[in-house]
Amino acid sequence: MNLKSIILNGLLVAGLCLAVFLLYRIFQQYSLDQIVQSVRSIPLSTFCTALLFAAASYLCLSCFDFLAIRSLGKSLPYRKIVLASFISLSLGHNIGFAGLSSGAFRYRFYSRWGLTTEDVAKIILFCGVTVGLGLVTLGGLALTINPDDAARLLRADAASTRIFGLLALIVPVLYAGLAFFVRGRLSLWRWSFQLPRFSIAVAQVGVGTVNFMLVSACLHQMLSTFGDVAFFRSVTAYVLANSAILATHVPGGLGVLEATVSYVVPQQASIGALIAFRCAYFFIPLMLGTMLLLVSEVVFRRSGGGAEEEAEERAEAQSV
């Protein structure tokens, strides 16, 4: 086992330990009857509406891949992009280290359809940038419109938090401006980047922001069952929780999401709301994604894909 594997495994174990600790801190104040009763108090219509927002988010996420493939000058049927994106992200969101885990599943699918390793790496990077742009943009809006909750969590004053939000909104504007004015590669120190076309850059900011708004709407549906909560307060809770998840790489954000949301909206963050949200956005897509992965593998093998892969592997081995 090399040093990189040891570090990754160590981070995974540390993340799981953190998740267990946070979940223990959250659940220790509830009995099983209280948890069951809290989940049951969510109307079916509310849960179904939240599911629709979750489905719309995953559909929006497929647009990340679609834009990435367009930026490469490639073309794939949208049904294939949706399949690869949903399976990759529904599993990646729950496994942790989403960029690496979802990237492995993306490579599994896109390499079958003619894309190279370099192409897949660029798709992963493009999607990561889109996630960052969406999170920064919506975070900037949340900090500007609703600075009080973030200020309480960050232990800062509301005025400073609003200024930080306005500064964050400069990032997507700067990104789109660079895409408009810089036609070639952009060099920063030792790195160089090929910026997408201006239209694609603007679309990145748009779909990235809409995606996080849809996830926040899913969370808002659950929280609003237990009290009146403003939509942008739910946005603030989710943006801060997702930022913490990205920083810790805890699988599925277990414990991190619950702890952050409970701190931002303590009155409405019932354990039932948090469990229902996790089911709608994480567990149900995970089950569907797993089933689709198994079905796609069976179909691929029966269509002769396995033989083609073996032939390619033999050819590569002979060339080496």
Image: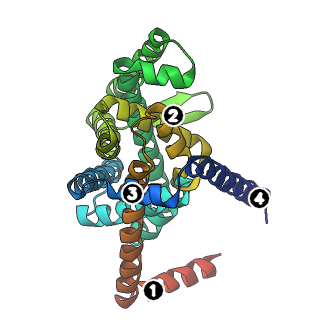
Q: Earlier in the sequence, mark 2 or mark 4?
A: 4
Vertical comparison of 153 with 307: above or below: above
Report the residue marked by disc 3. Answer: 37
- For image coordinates 40% across by 16% down, the residue present is 166
Q: Which is more N-terminal, label 4 or label 1?
A: 4
Discs 1, 4 touching: Cβ within 8 Å: no
Q: Quadrant of residue 58?
A: bottom left
Instruction: Locate the C terminus and report the quarter of the image it occupies.
Output: bottom right
The span from disc 1 to disc 4 (Cα, nearest Å) is 32 Å
- Residue 266 picture location, percent across and down: 46, 35
Residue 120: x and y, percent?
A: 46, 57
Image quarter where the N terminus lies is bottom right
Location of mark 1 (residue): 306
Q: Which mark is residue 6?
A: 4
> Dots 3 and 2: beta carbons under 8 Å?
no
Crowd band around label 4 with a 10 angstrom C-alpha radius: few (<14), some (14–19), many (20+) = few
Image quadrant of residue 40? bottom left
- Up the image or down, 298 lies above or below 216; here it is below
> Helix, strand or loop at disc 3?
helix
Badge 2 crowding class, 10 Å Cα cut-off, few under 14, some 14 to 19, many 20 or more, is some
Q: Which mark is residue 263?
A: 2
Quadrant of the rendered image containing residue 41: bottom left
**Residue type, label 4:** Ile
Q: Is residue 154 visible?
A: yes
Which circle's residue, 1 or 3, is located before the other in the chain? 3
> Looking at the picture, which amino acid does disc 3 mark?
Gln
**Tag 2 and tag 4, C-beta contact below 8 Å:** no
Q: Position of residue 258 (x, y in %)?
A: 50, 45
SS class of the residue under badge 2?
A: helix
